[in-house]
Image (tube, grey):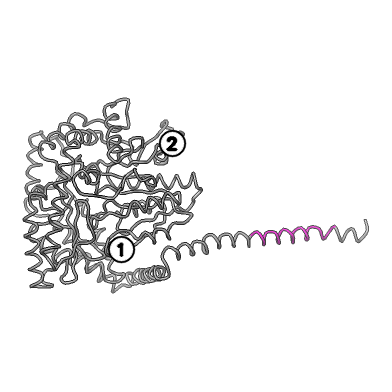
Amino acid sequence: MSSQVVRRTSQLPWKAIALTLKIYDQAKSSVFWNVFWNYVLVRAFWTLRAKGFAGVADDAKTWILELFTKIAFRIPPIKRKIDKEMAKVRDDIEAKIAPRGPGIVRHLAIPLEGKTPKWIEDEMERMDKQERGDIWKEGKMSGGIYHGGEELNDLLVAAFKKFVVSNPLHPDVFPTIRRMDAEIVAMCLRMYNNPSGAGTTTSGGTESILMSCKAHRDWGRAVKGIKDPEIVVPVSAHAAFYKAAAYFKMKVQMIPVDLITRKVDIERVRRAINPNTVLIVGSAVNFPDGCMDDIGALAKMAKKHKVGMHVDCCLGSFIMPFLEKAGYPVDPFDFRLEGITAISCDTHKYGFAPKGTSVIMYRDAELRTYQYFSMPSWPGGLYGSPSMAGSRGGAVLAGCWAAMQYMGQDGYLKSCKEIVGCRRQIELAIRDDIPELEVLGEPCGPVVAFTSDIISPMEVGDAMGTRGWHLNALNGPPAVHIACTRLTVPNVEQFIADLKDAVAEVKANPSKNKGTMVALYGLGQSTAIGPALVTQVANAYLDTMYLA
């Protein structure tokens, strides 16, 4: 072999290695550019388009403040002071929610011997009276209790008794519960003008919203190849959408509402829709102020961009479908609008079903399949469930079915007239007779909210609390609302009279009332530290819920 051949042969591995490194370098550069393009430039563009320079600047400011807050909370003197204050807050919460002392009997261990039914009934009655568990009967609570009357309550108890051991997870064993479950969904679908649609029952509005977000996420992945799903949500929408995003790894594009109409900004929604969008959201009605978004415009936009559209009717439930017949004109909000793909409706609110029942409805059965979970390879056999829960209580479904049969369309229509009429009476009284207060937007359902530029609405809320009313405090702007129920209707005149007195009291003695609403609102508005502390307060509250 010649020396030239030897040289060429010896150079071959090095040339091959050099070529390989060059290809690798180019590939690495290509991958880097691809990642940079898709995950930096493209996302930056869509974020800027959705929020504008001001919105991006606000996000950056918030992020910086939160960072400094986390650092500050770790500084020993500050941490000690915060811990001391939080200890006082926990004591206050525990004193109100889980009181101790003489007469408070705590049942912390299973008794060695079982108690008699009479002892148990007597003990439950004693506990309920001691802790004023029947205060809701005074009719001074905003929402929360959706009471359909004593006769319906007796009917619900009878339904519970008959189906107390039933479980829809076993339809072959409990065929009646399976049928009731399906019929509840069918009745709601017809009420929302989609008899050929599909749906499932759930444990409440939060689960209904979670299931819709999960279904649209999986639909987006399977049909459109979306790996980083986003949902477009009005700032006024229910917190459950943010919970769903946290659970299911979805990005939220939060959209502001118009300060006057309280409807979501349609132009901002349009700008927020991008190739990763799987769902846009509208409320009919929203929880904070009882106003309804422009559902027609949102549905049209969803259809144009081929994305999902969820209408949250959890609070509107059995009020909204009867508004027009009750004499209150309302814009379309249900499945008659083609772009709508899902609607959530709480049967346990104005449907007067027992707590723990709601319905999530879809335009068609195909979309519903993306909600399901199945595991064919499980050693325990084929496992499949329609929603979050596995086993479910059939008794509450029987109660829900019974409530819908008992009320009938005529009963729900009558209820709608009374409740919306009650809300309207309060709204008119504020607009006409209480100039210090201002109604937020144009409420169309059971909720009315008020704010003020003259006096502190939070102080008014606290003053109403001293008169026995349990109202809801709101942010953005500071406001107070009442969700009217059938229990509110006979007390509406008293509410208006008390509200006038509360306003006069606050106006005459501003900053005198330092109640819960004022304290929490003041805490929540203090730069970035406020929200962080409110989170700790919320955690303390939740801890106390399970303090035996």
Circle 1 sits in a helix, a strand or a loop, which is it? loop
Q: Quadrant of residue 273?
A: bottom left
Q: Assign the N terminus to one quadrant of the image.
A: bottom right
Q: Quadrant of residue 66?
A: bottom left
- Looking at the image, how many numbered discs can be counted on the residues? 2
Q: Is residue 13 above or below residue 84?
A: above
x and y, in percent, of residue 124 in the image: 10, 42
Range covered by the magenta-colored residues = 9-27
x and y, in percent, of residue 472 in the image: 19, 58
The overriding secondary structure of the stretch rendered in magenta is helix
Looking at the image, is mark 2 or mark 1 earlier in the sequence? 1
Q: Which residue lies under the disc numbered 1?
A: 258
Question: Is 346 on the left or on the right of 219, as rendered?
Answer: left
Circle 2 sits in a helix, a strand or a loop, which is it? strand
Q: Which residue is more in the foreground, 63 or 88?
A: 63
Residue 16 covered by magenta stretch: yes
Question: Is 516 on the left or on the right of 375, as rendered?
Answer: left
- The circle on residue 542 is none
Question: Is 11 on the left or on the right of 75, as rendered?
Answer: right
Q: Residues within 10 Å of mark 2 (few under 14, many from 20)?
A: few
Q: Which residue lies under the disc numbered 2?
A: 375
Q: Is residue 314 above or below residue 46?
A: above
Residue 22 covered by magenta stretch: yes
> Which amino acid type corresponds to the residue marked 2 in the rendered image?
Met
User: Which mark lies nearer to you, 2 or 1?
Assistant: 1
Q: Residues within 10 Å of mark 1 (few under 14, many from 20)?
A: few
* Most distant residue in the right direction: 2
| Residue at the spot 9% in from the left edge and 46% down from the top edge | 128
Q: Is residue 145 above or below residue 196?
A: below
> Which amino acid type corresponds to the residue marked 1 in the rendered image?
Asp
Q: Which residue is more in the foreground, 430 or 310?
A: 430
Find the distance from the CA under tag 2 to the CA under tag 1. Answer: 45 Å
